Image: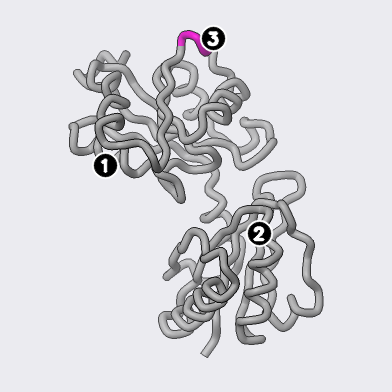
Amino acid sequence: MNKETKAGRLYLIPTLLGDVAPASVLPASVFNVVNRVRHYIAEDLRSARRFLKKAGIPVQFDNVKFYLLNKYTDDEELQNFLSGAARGYDTGLLSEAGMPCIADPGSRIVAMAHDSGIRVVPLTGPSSIMLALMSSGLTGQSFVFHGYLPVKPDGRNQAIRKLEADSIEHSQSQIFMETPYRNKKVLESVISVCKPSTRLCIACDITLASEYILTRRVSDWQKDIPDIHKRPAIFIIQGER
């Protein structure tokens, strides 16, 4: 329990991007919070328990309160998720992978915490989106993250054309992702739709031993297409005038 203030804090706790030793990518502040927090809001309960176990939570899970947060969770349930914090107990928010609230539904509970006067405390950790951008060599001054592109080929190709056009018009990096089993189709769409001069960064398995990050022009990718099937990946494109 947080004894300094009436309400507990909501800690935004970064998780691992894959099977790595937690200490290799997470700072001590994350382990300190995990060591004492007993209320957790999670996107996926199984992955949350797996992460907390690897991070060294010192109690049995029978003594931990978990709340499941996903796109189906309604606002009434969300308010209940903060009941522990309202009573003075610090609460942790966990994403399935990486940073909470980035490409996951966590922002809803954070907004509710602000409205309820609960202090929000972000912790440092890996973000596949930011790590891909910083290692891409593409502009970090202006960029847009689009999440997932349309699944159907026609819609996906149309979206890619628009991203490339926006990138050229606004001198922006355009960032998107895809589920690992559809990576190959997305890559094929990008190199078939974009101009040969457009730069494309493919960032796979970030922070893992199998990490692969490379930026090349589309014309170069067309000659040498990597096998990224079933590998978590971030794609970034930047066109040229």
Residue type, numbered disc 2:
Arg
Q: Amino acid at mark 3?
A: Gln
Closer to the camera in the image, 76 or 2 = 76
Residue 240 sits above or below residue 37 on the image:
below
* Quadrant of res 192: bottom right
Magenta stretch bounds: 59-63
Q: Which residue is mark 3?
A: 60
Q: Residues within 10 Å of mark 1 (few under 14, many from 20)?
A: few
Label 2 vs label 3: CA separation? 38 Å
18 relative position to 228: left or right: left
Could you say which quadrant of the image residue 84 lies in? top left
In the rendered image, residue 205 lying in the magenta stretch gets the answer no
Q: Give the labeled residue for mark 2.
A: 182
Which mark sits nearer the N-terminus, 1 or 2? 1
Please provide percent x and percent y for residue 230.
72, 52
State the SS at label 3: loop
Tell me the residue that label 1 is attached to: 111
Question: Can you give x and y, in whole percent of width and height, for residue 33 in the image?
Answer: 44, 23
Q: Earlier in the sequence, mark 3 or mark 1?
A: 3
Q: Secondary structure of the magenta portion, mostly?
A: helix
Q: Circle 2 — which element?
A: helix
Instruction: Select label 1 or label 2 by which is in front.
Output: 2
Of the numbered discs 2 and 3, the one sitting upstream in the chain is 3
The percent position of residue 165, horizontal first and vertical second, equals: 48, 83
